[in-house]
Amino acid sequence: MCLRAPHATGYPPGDEVIYKYFSSLHSSNDSSLSAHVAIARLLGAAYETMLRWLRKAQVGRTPGELLDYWHSVMEGSSQRANFFQEVVNVAKLVYHFHFHFSQH
């Protein structure tokens, strides 16, 4: 997962959908509660999505072949973009709480 701007120079290239996910946050404060929640939602979604993809791919593959498969997904293929799009979609579906503070 690379947060570099999509058309910025350098390696590794940025994952555009991940960049846009964080760019859409309503706070410019990286230490805000909403930023932490967004990060947690994305990491949880990435883990769940990765497990789903690997379980589906493991059928008929040896552990080494599964490792090769995952490497090919993550290294510059259109599958990488599809994977991260699915991750963001899952992260956006996760229920999140809204905290309201009042003084009494």
Image: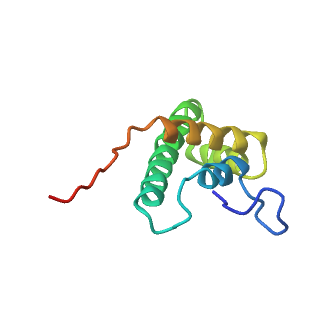
Where residue 56 appears, as percent x and y from the top left, is 55, 30
Where residue 8 appears, as percent x and y from the top left, is 82, 64
Q: Is residue 56 left or right of residue 18?
A: left
Q: Name the image quarter holding residue 19.
A: bottom right
Q: Is residue 53 left or right of residue 37?
A: right
Q: Name the image quarter holding residue 57.
A: top right
Q: Is residue 73 or residue 24 the one in the foreground?
A: 24
Task: Tally the numbered discs.
Answer: 0
Q: Name the image quarter holding residue 81.
A: top right
Which residue is at a point 79% across and 67% down the rendered structure image? 11
Q: Is residue 11 above or below residue 82?
A: below
Where residue 5 appears, as percent x and y from the top left, is 75, 60
Q: Is the C terminus in the top left, top right, bottom left or bottom right quadrant?
A: bottom left
Q: Is residue 29 left or right of residue 33?
A: right
Give the colouring mode of the picture: rainbow
**The furthest residue to the front:** 104
Q: Is residue 92 above or below residue 2?
A: above
Which residue is at a point 52% across and 47% down the rendered structure image? 46
Which residue is at a point 40% across and 60% down the rendered structure image? 33
Where residue 70 appears, as percent x and y from the top left, is 64, 46
Q: Is the N terminus in the top left, top right, bottom left or bottom right quadrant?
A: bottom right
Q: Is residue 63 or residue 97 the one in the foreground?
A: 97
**The furthest residue to the left:** 104
